[in-house]
Image: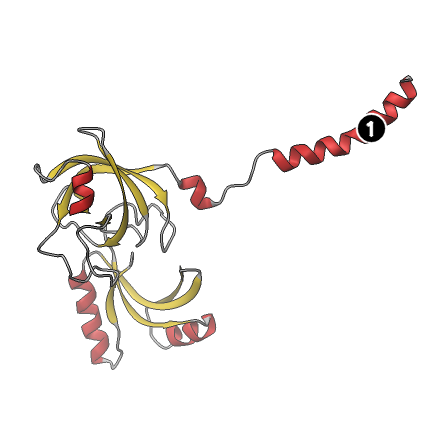
Amino acid sequence: MSVKHFRIYFFLLIPILLLTLSSCGAVKRTASEQKSGQIIGSGIASWYGPNFHGKLTANGETYNMNAYTAAHKTLPFNTVLRVDNVENGKSVTVRINDRGPYIANRIIDLSRRAAEQIDMIGTGTASVRLMLLREGDRPVDIQNVSSEESFTVQLAAFESESEAAARSNQIEGSRVEQVTINDRTIFRVYYGSYSNPEEAQSALNKLKQEGIEGFVKQVEN
């Protein structure tokens, strides 16, 4: 092959090489994929079973102690975690469908089946590490991973932002927040921010005296 022909061949080959590299190079990852595998907490796990079996969980499901589920104070429902028992190296995958535990220093409440999987039935508690596998109904962020609950008064919910804004304009001190649940965008009208449900209920009682209805809501739900 002559030098001239080689140069022509080389320059014709460059676009093909670039196209190939772009197609098999770095793939863009979604925000959820980028978070997957992150350690998002560590502490003491407990478990709950027969006394709650068949009752409703915080997200409206029926609690099944034989399913691989768990309760967390603030993580979005349907978040999937890997729970590592750091005392024995055993792990279990669970889905968040309930709220709790409400005992100091405990970060997660496992179903009986999940607790069996990591051998903590006998001890009742274990030191664990939580790894995020998949986000649930909402993105996992600094606020809802913290286990520090926050409360508000929800006054209304609309599919239209303009309708939500119109309602909020009628109530001094209220605000509109956009939430996405199961790929559906909703505009909620909230009033106030509180560190416990009692404070939120007191605010709601005052609103009711003015003829404004609503209900106390944990922000993370």
Along the viewing direction, whichever of 216 and 186 lies nearer the viewer: 186
- Mark 1: amino acid: Phe
Where residue 15 sits, quadrant-wise, is: top right
Q: Residues within 10 Å of mark 1 (few under 14, many from 20)?
A: few
Q: In the rendered image, which quarter contains the C terminus?
A: bottom left
* Percent coordinates x, y for residue 141 in the rendering: 36, 47
Residue 37 against residue 145 in the figure, above or below: above
**Would you identify the image quadrant in which residue 94 lies?**
top left
Front residue of this view, candidates 148 and 180: 180
Q: Residue furthest bottom?
A: 211
Q: Could you tell me which residue is drawn at 14 percent across and 45 percent down?
A: 47
Residue ranking furthest to the front = 66
* Residue 108 in view (yes/no): no
Is 93 left or right of 56, judged from the image as shown? right
What residue is drawn where x is 33% and y is 45%? 142
Q: Is residue 173 above or below residue 118?
A: below
For the rendered model, the colour scheme is secondary structure
133 to the left or right of 123:
right
Q: Nearer the viewer, residue 39 or 90?
A: 90
Instruction: Work out whether residue 50 can be spotted.
Output: yes
In the rendering, at what x and y percent does residue 187 appear? 41, 67
Q: Give the percent coordinates (x, y) of residue 105.
A: 14, 41
* SS state under label 1: helix
| Quarter of the N terminus within the rendering | top right
Which quarter of the picture shows residue 126? Answer: top left
Q: Residue at x 16, y 40 (%)?
A: 116
Residue 100 vs residue 125, the one in the foreground = 125
Q: For the point 56% across and 38% down, which residue is it?
A: 27
